[in-house]
Amino acid sequence: MAGQTCSAPALAALLSASDRTGNATAAAEYICSKLETAALTSVDITTAVDTTYLLFSAYMVFAMQLGFAMLCAGSVRAKNTMNIMLTNVLDAAAGGLFYYLFGFAFAFGSPSNGFIGRYFFALKSIPSPGFDYSYFLFQWAFAIAAAGITSGSIAERTQFVAYLIYSSFLTGFVYPVVSHWFWSPDGWAAANRDPSASLLFRSGVIDFAGSGVVHMVGGIAGFWGALIEGPRIGRFDHNGRPFALRGHSATLVVLGSFMLWFGWYGFNPGSFITIVKSYGPIGSPIHGQWSAVGRAAVTTTLAGCSAALTTLFGKRLQTGHWNVFDVCNGLLGGFAAITAGCAVVDPWAAIICGFVAAWVLIGCNKLAERFHYDDPLEAAQLHGGCGAWGVLFAALFAKEEFVNEAYPGRPGRPHGLLMGGGGRLLAAHVIQILVICGWVSATMGPLFYGLRKMDLLRISAEDELAGLDVTRHGGSAYVYDENSGGNGGDDGGFIMKGSKSTNRV
């Protein structure tokens, strides 16, 4: 039968032969073999489409590193531009090696216990039936995003060796353990636990794309780094009054914000991992994961837009100015908040999420000033504060239908409190916030404190005043003509010329 072509004449020839019984069996074998081949081909096509979807999502999340780099560069003073750009490059490079060697195994090595993974070190036994290389790439892009968040909090006054140490430790150990808890099928609080395992409060934690796992981890780590280092010179005067040390380029800030916006469409919708999956009758154009992916992109968009506009008018009322730096941070705060619930809430709820996230960010910034806390990019306030709000938001507004689609196999599981699902999901999410705060504080806090004690954390006051680019990286990122009155030369541009440098280790 294998030599036959699948066609109506071939089947008719089998059925019209004189030996009806024998040819009926042959016809049945022929039909079954063709159907089996078609089914296997369909599986291959589905796998190829899903893998391509995941890879392109990973590429988009990785492109967020460019967004982080541009945002960071624009948010610091010109004298520290090369330093912050280099730290963003090293976050990806060091994070890549340490996540390959240890991080992925700690996060997703299975079978394991509920606390930490134990297999797949250096991708041993990958690809496996559960994981392929594309999944590693996607998760690595998330890990280095957490490290990139932290680098913004300690910008403009940190020794370069400290960046290397914290970035390797965060991506190789601290972040992977948290992602194991909430995203691995073996994790003690995961919503997608194996069917044979019980769920935390019968619901597990629905942190779909990482408001807690990524943003809170990066934000809290940055909080401890900035707190232990202390504020930059000049950020507060001798009476404790705050003085704004504004970034040098609104252009780079806006460019970075748009790059991050673009990348968030891989970050949130990409967290479905697959796209070819039906929820309803076969052939339905709307009852499938492809529709849920689109909805996640819409909720992401609306939350960011709502937060940006709320920040625009909120800061206008406070300061009397329309400030692009504040609006961009508000936009990103909305994205950080919707990340947990993007797949399980209605679009209208996303607008509420962004609105509240903007006020959370404004409030956190007020508290930071009051307690003399200095974060050049507002990273701890934005990712830590808005991330925590996003975790609570998902527990309040998660819709039962969407929860069952994103996390199938557990009918009747609790959903959002304000959507009639009871308080179990909210209780699980409060636990998530507490354990993330505790774990990151217990690991990153002592690390930064130890670096300070060994004089490996903060640069000298002399170097800080001169700028890290000149004192640590061989020269300024931008060189102005000193005789042009600040205009950059007769043609109004930059004059590129050599600059004296004072290199220190």
Image (cartoon, rainbow, N blue to C red):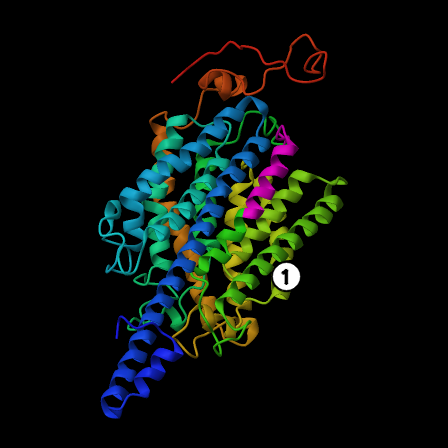
Tell me residue 198's x, y (percent).
32, 72
Q: Is residue 482 left or right of residue 293?
A: right
Placement of 388 over or under 329, stated as above or below: below
Estimate how packed mark 1 is, as few (under 14), some (14 to 19) or many (20 or more) residues with alpha carbons within 10 Å: some
Circle 1 residue: 352
Q: Residue at x 68, y 48 (%)?
A: 311
Q: Is residue 176 left or right of residue 493?
A: left
- Please tell me whether residue 386 belongs to the stretch shown in magenta: no
Tell me residue 447's x, y (percent).
35, 37
Placement of 133 over or under 6, stated as above or below: above
- Please tell me whether residue 259 belongs to the stretch shown in magenta: yes
Q: Residue at x 48, y 26 (%)?
A: 83
Tell me residue 52's x, y (percent).
43, 54
Q: Nearer the viewer, residue 208 or 370?
A: 208
Determine the secondary structure under disc 1. Answer: helix
Q: Which residues are magenta?
A: 242-262
Question: Extreme front residue here?
Answer: 18
Residue 499 seen anywhere in this rendered image of the structure: yes
User: Principal SS element in the magenta part?
Assistant: helix
Q: Nearer the viewer, residue 317 or 344?
A: 344
Tell me residue 307's x, y (percent).
64, 52
Q: Amino acid at mark 1?
A: Ile
Q: Residue at x 35, y 66 (%)?
A: 41
